Amino acid sequence: MNVLGIAAYYHDAAAALVYDGQIVAAAQEERFTRKKHDSNFPIHAVRYCLHEGRLAPHELDAVIFYEKPFLKFERILETYFAFAPKGYTSFAKGIPVWIKDKLFQKRMIIDNLSTLDGTISWKDKLLFSEHHLSHAASAFYPSPFTSAAILTADGVGEWATTSLAVGQGRDICIIKEIHFPHSLGLLYSAFTYYTGFKVNSGEYKVMGLAPYGEPKYVHRIKDHLIDIKNDGSFRLNIEYFDYATGLRMTNERFHHLFGGPPRQPESPLTQREMDLAASIQAVTEEVMLKLARSIRQETGERHLCLAGGVALNCVTNGKLLRTGIFDDLWIQPAAGDAGGAVGAALAAYHLWAQRPRAVNGADSMHGAYLGPAYSQQEIEERLTACGARYETLSDEALLDACARRLAEGLALGWHQGRMEFGPRALGNRSILGDPRSPTMQKILNLKVKYRESFRPFAPAVLREDVADWFELDHDSPYMLLVADVRKDHRMAMTDEQQKLFGIDKLNVPRSSIPAVTHVDYSARIQTVHRETNPRFYALLSRFKQLTGCPVLVNTSFNIRGEPIVESPEDAFRCFMGTELDALAIGNCFLEKRDQNSDLKQKYTTAFEPD
């Protein structure tokens, strides 16, 4: 049975193909259109999925959309009526769009599918899941667990913002929900907006900023904004927010509570923003840990699966793992809306078609390597057409050349195999560097990624070596767990350095791998496994042979505001528009010094900052 899952029309549109319960392909539309968080119907991603599955459109048995548009429209209407006359301006702007376009999403979906084949009766194949069911399915079905509790948390779907479910075999049963406007995801997004970052884009920046601050606003948040019960359920005081019916996330009452208007985007960060970030991060952790404890008590399940945008908060995930509330966790790597395409397709297969689920003790996301790959011949043809100057090396020679450049402190673009699905580059569309370099973090942020200097980088580490370098001995293949660098690799700070506050801590070396050690000694860890990514594993192993260090800096292959590169052409453009030193695409090896200088690009203005 072939099932196509689709997520679209809000942000991070994506498509996924499931064949007989196995995920064959999945990709976000942004990777093809080069428009970050592209929300349009994912026609390019759909075409890729069909190509990867070697399917003609008529061979699809079902197409399923990840949520129910009419339920979402019902929620929007009821919210406006409940808050009337407040929100009229937003109502006047938003409702015509819904009536013109979004209310008729079924027709829009069918029209877009008809561009693939206009002879097919697509309405007979089209199904609709519910938003949080899609998230729950994306969390449970690919997990290695035969039964588990499932916690999903995000901004909002149709009505639900947080849901608790239990998965057993092929079945998922949703037990409890928290409904809009009470939303942990929207609370975090309100602080994202207030600290000057983009909603649905900058939440991870708030998480990265938090260690620079002190959680001094926690009591103020809990006294005025959120009422947290012992079981983790919560209610927000909507009088402080504008997201229900307005055009902003926060209102004047919120601004007065925290001492002033929101920070203007791109303006200098102050200690206030750092303290606010630390505070909302602490509140988020409290809610999620309380929810987890109550879920364990209520369901008796020993395993927990997580999805929804809040599940991308890897600091919270790391603390949840360390509490031992559950024996094990599994987190959907594309936990946001894009992953809803995978979840919807799996829900159609197991719940609608009632097909059985096979569990073999490993997750079925295939390391999240579910996107396009290019043959060596295709790579060479495309690079030649770009005017690139490259050398084609054997596998061994390529690994040796790349490892040596990295050991010399150079920045390397690494484009290999199938593209990753989800927001993280996991060693196939990555920029790599030497974590031992005290300047690598600054170089990559300012001269390669062209992004804010405070942002940390993640370590990729050989799975068998992770416990020797970090306070973690657990698989973390999707970069969704944070743990501290081991004490024997840390550097003690002087008394003078201990007195530093906020961003002043940035340039103080804190460990033997300073480029991946955050100011609180933490790191967002990716464990690399021979079984799922043999080439990246081999590169790390060669780097370890040269340096004794089994760790590399791993960040996504893009600049700020740009989607992660998809094709060899994307990679070459980024290479020529940044201060990357070398590039490996397949077995082609390129060095910047060898390239035609006429091909250099002014890349920093090519994309709108995220």
Image: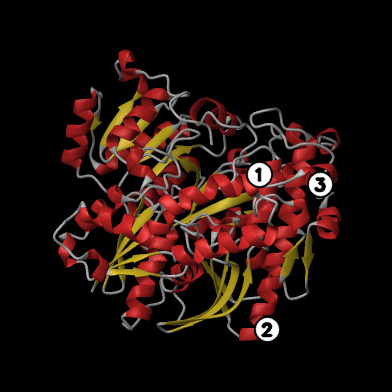
Q: Amino acid at mark 2?
A: Gln
Q: Mark 2 or 3, which is nearer the eye?
A: 3
**What residue is at 48 percent from the left and 63 percent from the top?**
332
* 81 relative position to 449: left or right: right
Label 3 environment density (alpha carbons within 10 Å; few <14, some 14–19, many ≥20): some
- Residue 271 position in % (x across, y down): 79, 36
Gap in Å between the C-alphas at discs 2 and 1?
38 Å
Of labels 2 and 3, earlier in sequence is: 3
Of labels 3 and 1, earlier in sequence is: 1
Q: Mark 2 or 1, which is nearer the eye?
A: 1
Q: Secondary structure at mark 3?
A: helix
Q: Is residue 195 visible?
A: yes
- Residue 57 position in % (x across, y down): 18, 60
Q: Secondary structure at mark 2?
A: helix
Question: Which label belongs to residue 398?
Answer: none
Residue at numbered disc 3: 253
- Residue 408 position in % (x across, y down): 47, 29
Label 1 environment density (alpha carbons within 10 Å; few <14, some 14–19, many ≥20): some
Q: Amino acid at mark 1?
A: Arg
**What residue is at 28 percent from the left and 33 percent from the top?**
569
Q: Secondary structure at mark 1?
A: loop
Gap in Å between the C-alphas at discs 2 and 3?
38 Å
- Residue 532 position in % (x across, y down): 36, 59
Please state which of residues 66 and 268 is positioned toward the viewer in this rendering: 66
Q: Amino acid at mark 3?
A: Arg
Gap in Å between the C-alphas at discs 3 and 1?
13 Å
Q: How is the image coloured?
A: secondary structure
Residue at numbered disc 1: 248
Please state which of residues 126 and 266 is positioned toward the viewer in this rendering: 126
Q: Quadrant location of residue 575? A: top left
Residue at numbered disc 2: 297
